[in-house]
Image (cartoon, coloured by chain):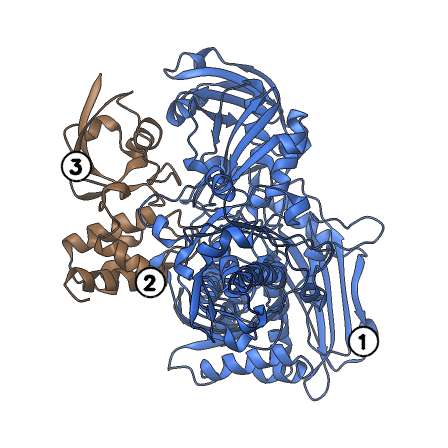
Chain colours: A brown, B blue
């Protein structure tokens, strides 16, 4: 049975097992590989996407549960890599291997949407679930503060 | 990155420089002492008529910055416009490119001279082409960011406009390199070339390979190391929607489906019986006892100075201590995976691998095809840390693909597969003895090491250097030293883990040196200064870190620990600042000084230093792989947690540039962090941590 939802602003319908996690629908069925597989148990944050604007771990989210909802992935964060977190990530040159960064960026974008000027404690709380084995945490923190400035209109 | 096909198409027109030095190039031969075999370096530089410059990157990228750093070396001497640079991963061609793999923090060390020469050769050809056009002496011309300039006439020609003519000229046999004071790129914090694609989802990692007609595989292996499949029943697995086939390979039984999740679901109901083999009896406590017993037996000598036994017997003050570290998993964010298609006459692979040549050889062995018929597409790696030097996951994918000829197969390991079938950092055990003289200075130092071997050694008295490096490589001047090793085979597969033997041995040795300082009543920095008087580079980073960390003047309630290491051609010192309240440990600050010789990109050096400290910190604070009934107990990040953003200390990096050939950087900062922290814990509590990971009950 077809499952309908909004994906990165456009209507999307997939005919898959309703229990199949959103992660694998995105990656295998729809070919959007920017969302990553890391643990399969919502322990690492590599698969972080937004569902109706909220941070969601796609690896444990059955596709049926997003029926009628709006899903945003890294590919839909901006059409031209211009979202404040993407700009800040480039300015700060954050990624090393880069594998976790889609999830980090999605978590950071959600934090800034709710908390325009996050403190270090806010960042710790919002990003605690996103592992970076390259240990780029200090740069991630600086980039989030910078993204808040960009979003607030500071060049 | 553009595709190889685009490159070849473009290569039909324009300057294409493939340089092969028959033997070691002059710069290479000048003396990086380490690991210098015959080097046949080369690089492909393509200058297209539109001015685009494409570099073939012969090394793989796992986050360490090779794509950017190697491009900087080429672009510096080519003198092209940095904005015109494009890159792609080179095909595997050992005859042309030499060693293609990323190990031992060796990429910059191995290419610093050769890639600059390649860039300089291409530049010389472009200059010659302009000289012919203008009928002037090439020596009167100069280059400026993608243009050849005639200072006399003010005429300018772009590299793009010259590329077709330059391509007809011979490749020069010798090249004059830039005076370093004229560098525009090398030594500057140039932005990474791979960043934009890594913030918008476009970067293609191994797991992102997509090939038309591809099917997805998940493999059940025997949980016990060395075990084999006895029998299996695929009936239930085949009823799972999406499952297409079930095939047995040498290492297990694979479920193949039209998506990853269905393959994993099929695997859940696949019934497999195993012959578990002899390792089934192994457990961590037994392995630890075996190591301890072995450490009492005679070992193979790795280093001997003076007469340590006599010095120990005669010294007024002696101490002994036993240290131990566990097996560790690499746990890169991207689980192991490989995509492969096997046809009667060819095989194509998409792999996130540190071992490009090894991957091709592995596929050739399994398929029976000549290596030239194996095409490897080098993908970005979601972390490597040594794990992806192994080709076990490549073997599995190629075996499955061979069983389904013509069908592309993507094999994806689950996190549990990755953690339970890693090739681990070896567990290790060491028994130290040491003595100080009547004035408190060390006069004897002995270490009896027991740990597994994966790098040769252990037969006929030969020593596996990876088992003792960090101990037998200590530069401390102590008059009597004895270091030996015995191979302790626990049946657990092991391999390189970021910084290799130093990861445990620097913890052991730098802790025991601290114990000797305490025994002699010496300040840990003062003692190291004295013992490193003849090691100018280590002494310099020690002094730098002591000054920058305000050694001896920690804020109230905080305590400092120091550790140093010389590995991969670089010299690193760290001071950790901790507080311990009850059983709560907080690491506030880490100050690190590093001398890695000539600097290519200071921003990447800082990244790598921070990265190594965090990687080492997870091992110091959290991680252990334990064994029960021959299998790994941990399976995911809930049982093998790692440092997260809220646990980050402030890290300060101080680069001490020296006039030496570039050292490695990816592994430089991993070893000292554990002993810097545990030495600081000793300063805070008087409790000596001799076993990792640090257990809070041991320091409360």
- Residue at point 41% right, 45% down? B637
Quarter of the image that includes the C terminus of chain A: bottom left
For residue A28, side relative to residue B235 (left or right) = left
Residue B288 in percent (x, y) is at 64, 50
Q: How many marks?
A: 3
Quarter of the image that includes the N terminus of chain A: top left
The residue that mark 3 highlights is: A9
Co-location on one chain, circles 3 and 1? no
Residue B343 in percent (x, y) is at 57, 21
* Residue B520 tag number: none
Q: Establish if A39 lies above or below B538.
A: above
Chain of the residue displaying label 1: B
The residue that mark 2 highlights is: A92
Q: Nearer the viewer, residue B580 or B575?
A: B575
Kindly indicate whether the residue at mark 2 contacts the one at mark 1 (C-beta within 8 angstroms): no
The residue that mark 1 highlights is: B313
Residue B217 in percent (x, y) is at 47, 25
Residue B206 in percent (x, y) is at 46, 39
Kindly indicate whether the residue at mark 2 contacts the one at mark 3 (C-beta within 8 angstroms): no
């Amino acid at each position: 049975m077809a499952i309908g939802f909004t994906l990165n602003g456009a209507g999307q319908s997939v005919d898959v097992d309703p229990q199949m996690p959103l992660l694998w629908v995105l990656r295998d069925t729809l070919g959007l590989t920017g969302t990553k597989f890391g643990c399969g148990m919502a322990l690492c944050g590599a698969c972080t996407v937004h569902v109706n604007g909220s941070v969601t771990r796609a690896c444990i989210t059955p596709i049926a549960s997003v029926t009628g909802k709006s899903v945003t992935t890294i590919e839909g964060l901006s059409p031209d890599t211009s979202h404040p977190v993407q700009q800040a990530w480039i300015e700060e040159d954050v990624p090393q291997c880069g594998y976790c960064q889609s999830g980090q960026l999605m978590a950071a974008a959600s934090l800034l949407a709710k908390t325009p000027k996050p403190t270090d404690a806010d960042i710790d709380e919002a990003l605690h679930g996103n592992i970076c084995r390259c240990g780029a945490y200090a740069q991630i923190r600086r980039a989030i503060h910078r993204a808040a400035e960009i979003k607030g209109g500071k060049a | 990155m553009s595709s190889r096909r685009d490159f070849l198409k473009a290569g039909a027109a324009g300057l294409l420089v493939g340089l092969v030095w028959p033997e070691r190039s002059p710069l290479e031969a000048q003396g990086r002492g380490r690991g210098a075999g015959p080097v046949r370096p080369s690089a492909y530089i393509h200058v297209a008529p539109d001015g685009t410059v494409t570099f073939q990157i012969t090394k793989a990228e796992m986050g360490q910055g090779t794509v950017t750093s190697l491009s900087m070396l080429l672009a510096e001497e080519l003198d092209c416009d940095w904005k015109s640079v494009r890159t792609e991963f080179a095909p595997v061609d050992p005859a042309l490119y030499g060693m293609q793999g990323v190990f031992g923090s060796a990429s910059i060390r191995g290419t610093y001279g050769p890639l600059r020469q390649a860039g300089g050769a291409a530049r010389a050809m472009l200059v010659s082409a302009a000289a012919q056009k203008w009928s002037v002496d090439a020596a009167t011309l100069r280059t400026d960011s993608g243009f050849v300039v005639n200072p006399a006439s003010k005429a300018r020609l772009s590299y793009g406009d010259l590329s077709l003519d330059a391509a007809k000229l011979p490749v020069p046999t010798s090249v004059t390199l830039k005076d370093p004071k004229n560098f525009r790129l090398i030594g500057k914090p140039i932005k990474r070339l791979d960043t934009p694609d890594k913030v918008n989802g476009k970067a293609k990692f191994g797991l992102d390979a997509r090939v038309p007609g591809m099917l997805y595989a998940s493999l059940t292996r025997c949980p016990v190391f060395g075990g084999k499949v006895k029998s299996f029943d695929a009936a239930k697995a085949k009823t799972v929607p999406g499952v297409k086939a079930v095939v047995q390979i040498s290492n297990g039984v694979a479920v193949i489906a039209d998506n990853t999740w269905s393959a994993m679901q099929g695997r859940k109901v696949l019934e497999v019986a195993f012959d578990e083999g002899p390792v089934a009896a192994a457990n961590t406590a037994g392995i630890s006892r075996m190591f301890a017993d072995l450490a009492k037996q005679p070992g193979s000598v790795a280093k001997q100075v003076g007469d340590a036994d006599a010095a120990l017997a005669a010294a007024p003050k002696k101490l002994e201590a036993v240290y131990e570290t566990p097996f560790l998993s690499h746990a890169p964010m991207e689980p192991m995976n490989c995509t492969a298609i096997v046809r009667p006459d060819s095989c194509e692979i998409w792999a996130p691998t540190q071992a490009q040549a090894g991957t091709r050889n592995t596929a050739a062995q399994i398929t029976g095809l000549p290596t030239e018929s194996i095409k490897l597409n080098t993908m970005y790696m979601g972390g490597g840390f040594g794990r992806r030097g192994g080709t076990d996951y490549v073997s599995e994918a190629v075996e499955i693909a061979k069983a389904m000829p013509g069908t592309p197969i993507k094999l994806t390991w689950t996190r549990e597969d990755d953690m339970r079938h890693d090739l681990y950092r070896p567990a290790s055990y060491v028994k130290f003895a040491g003595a100080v003289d009547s004035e408190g200075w060390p006069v004897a130092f002995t270490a009896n090491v027991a740990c597994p071997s994966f790098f040769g050694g252990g037969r006929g008295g030969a020593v596996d250097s990876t088992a003792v490096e960090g101990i037998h490589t200590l530069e401390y001047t102590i008059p009597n030293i004895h270091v030996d090793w015995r191979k302790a085979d626990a049946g657990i597969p092991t391999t390189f883990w970021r910084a290799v033997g130093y990861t445990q041995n620097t913890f052991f040795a730098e802790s025991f040196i601290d114990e000797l300082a305490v025994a002699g009543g010496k300040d840990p920095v003062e003692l190291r200064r004295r013992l490193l008087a003849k090691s100018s580079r280590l002494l310099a980073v020690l002094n730098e870190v002591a000054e920058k960390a305000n050694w001896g003047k920690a804020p109230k309630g905080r305590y400092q620990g120091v550790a140093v290491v010389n590995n991969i051609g670089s010299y690193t010192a760290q001071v950790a600042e901790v507080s311990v309240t009850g059983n709560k440990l907080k690491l506030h600050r880490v100050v690190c000084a590093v001398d890695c010789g000539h600097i290519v990109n200071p921003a990447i050096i800082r990244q790598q230093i921070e990265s190594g400290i965090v990687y080492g910190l997870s091992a110091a604070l959290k991680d252990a792989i334990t064994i029960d009934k021959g299998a790994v107990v941990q399976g995911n990040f809930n049982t093998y947690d790692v440092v997260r953003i809220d646990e980050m200390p402030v890290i300060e990096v101080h680069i001490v540039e020296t006039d030496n050939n570039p050292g490695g950087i990816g592994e430089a900062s991993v070893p000292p962090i554990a002993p810097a922290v545990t030495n600081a814990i000793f300063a805070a509590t008087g409790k000596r941590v001799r076993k990792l990971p640090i257990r809070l009950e041991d320091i409360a």
